[in-house]
Image (cartoon, helix red, strand yellow):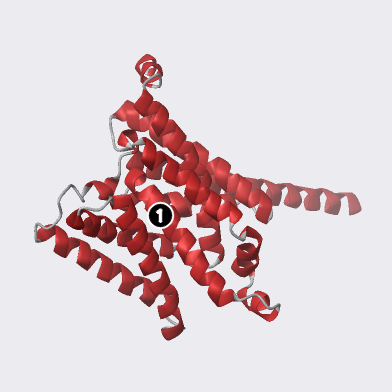
Amino acid sequence: MFESLFEALQMSFMQRALAATLAMSLLCPVMGLFLVLRRSSMTGDALSHSSLAGAAAALALGVNPVVGTFVFTAVCGLMIEALRSVFRHYGDLVLTIVQALSVGIALTLITMGLVKGNAESFLFGSILTISQTDLWCIPAAALLWVGFGLSTLTVIAFDEDSARAAGVKTRRWSYAFSLLTASAVAAAIPMVGVLVLSSMIALPAATALQLKVGFKRTLIAAIVISIIDAFLGLIFAYLLDAAPGGVTALASGAVLLLVLICRAAIRRFRHDCAAAAAVKKSTEIV
């Protein structure tokens, strides 16, 4: 079984899949950590559903689906930021509105038979069938994230009110943040699919936050965890002959569960050690 896996790794499509997996593992946790810190982790899920409508519209118009996905996702990202000012105390309602409209557009176009292609493939993605052009989309999105005001986005993610008091134009940066997220989602959707992308964004960040090691180390840990999740998913997907996206989501959940169990065990061990030390000290006093 593993010999066939080794042989498959010699093929160009598997090598492209590995390269895409590494790039995704660098991009998704960075985006996910910022979304989690802004308490808007579901934004990634809403935008991923928006991307399906963009892909369907692009296929209906005969346009490159990646371009259509980015344009529509960017519009939806800007719409989310605009609606946040209208529904200030109902942030989750904004995401529901955008997601409902996006799914409605996608289903309408598909069921009317206007889509000239297989829009449903974007639901699950296929990292094994990506093209060289698709592969370059992810590093481009990653460079945008890293090079475009990463320090400012960090300040806003931690404390937007303090950033605003310090003179940072948080509103503009929020719109820029939405466009960056849209670029990352548009690049990732053809590879992992609408139904799985949110897990790749949120779960590595959630796992890294359990380590409680500060922002920089948490970011590094999220990237390392994402790489482990993605490569486990790709390997087991090949061995099980299953969709890589779904197996990656399961691997991410398993790693998160393992970290939670280990953290609980360590906390229990420290508690028992402290209790034993307290008992020993009390017996020495007596």
Q: Does residue 251 sit above or below 51 in this rendering?
A: above
Residue 18 sits in which quadrant? top left
* Position in image of residue 155 (x %, y %): 65, 67
* Position in image of residue 132 (x %, y %): 38, 36
Please, what secondary structure does the residue beneath circle 1 have? Answer: helix
Residue at image position (62%, 61%) is: 149
* Left or right relative to 119: residue 193: right
* Left or right relative to 138: residue 269: right
Residue at image position (55%, 57%) is: 33
Q: Amino acid at mark 1?
A: Val
Q: Does residue 2 sit above or below 280 in this rendering?
A: above
Using a 10 Å C-alpha cutoff, classify the residue at mark 1 as few (fewer than 14 neighbours), some (14 to 19) or many (20 or more). many
Can residue 204 be seen in this snapshot? no
The quadrant of the rendering that contains the N terminus is: top left
Q: Does residue 285 sit above or below 154 in this rendering?
A: above
Residue extending farthest to the front is: 62
Q: In front: 114, or 154?
A: 114
All told, the count of numbered labels is 1
Kindly identify which residue carries mark 1: 185
Residue extending farthest to the right is: 285
* Position in image of residue 120 (x %, y %): 21, 50
Q: In front: 169, or 63?
A: 63
Residue at image position (40%, 22%) is: 9
Q: Does residue 138 sit above or below 231 in this rendering?
A: below
Can residue 109 be seen in this snapshot? yes
